[in-house]
Image (cartoon, rainbow, N blue to C red):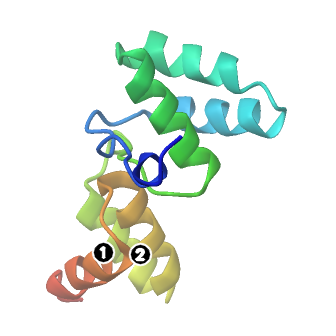
Amino acid sequence: MGFFDGLRRPPAPTRPLDRDTVDRVLVLVRDRRKIEAIKLVRERTGMGLADAKYTVEALEEGRRVPVEPTPGRSLADRVRELLGQDRVADAVVLVSRETGMTETEAARFIDSLGR
């Protein structure tokens, strides 16, 4: 493996995962069943092997991956609800998790909602 091979990574996954898939992948990774987690991501999203592996590794390392929004209420409505409960940190995590934004971008988004 060359010096630059460790620096090269595929781009972040572009297809959002549903919340159930993320939760199941995290359980499988925690149980050291990474191959099963990769298979699950491939089955549920139609991703290729490399993209699914990268997605599982991103979740394993705690990096953000796009997650489909929870059906029902809009993201903005759910963020406003959290802000009303004085749960700003939870709102930032919610926006980051569902959009793939960084924490800084999520905080800017939340500020733009105008409480």
x then y, percent, for residue 93: 47, 69
Counting residues from the N terminus, which is met first, the one under dot 1 or under dot 2?
Answer: 2
Q: Amino acid at mark 1?
A: Ala
Q: How many numbered tags mark residues here?
A: 2
Which label is found at residue 41? none
x then y, percent, for residue 2: 48, 46
- Secondary structure of the residue carrying tag 2 is helix
- Residue at (68%, 16%) from the top-left corner? 36
x then y, percent, for residue 68: 34, 40
The part of the image, by quadrant, that contains residue 16 is top left
- Residue at (65%, 30%) from the top-left corner? 24
Determine whether 32 is above or below 97 in the image.
above
In the rendered view, does 27 fall on the left or right side of 96? right
Mark 2 lies on residue: 92
In the rendered view, does 35 fall on the left or right side of 3? right
Distance from disc 1 to disc 2, alpha carbons, whole Å, reads 6 Å
The part of the image, by quadrant, that contains residue 49 is top left
The part of the image, by quadrant, that contains residue 39 is top right
Please tell me which residue lies in front, 6 or 69.
6
Please tell me which residue lies in front, 65 or 98.
65
Determine whether 41 is above or below 14 in the image.
above
Q: Amino acid at mark 2?
A: Val
- Residue at (63%, 46%) from the top-left corner? 60
Mark 1 lies on residue: 106
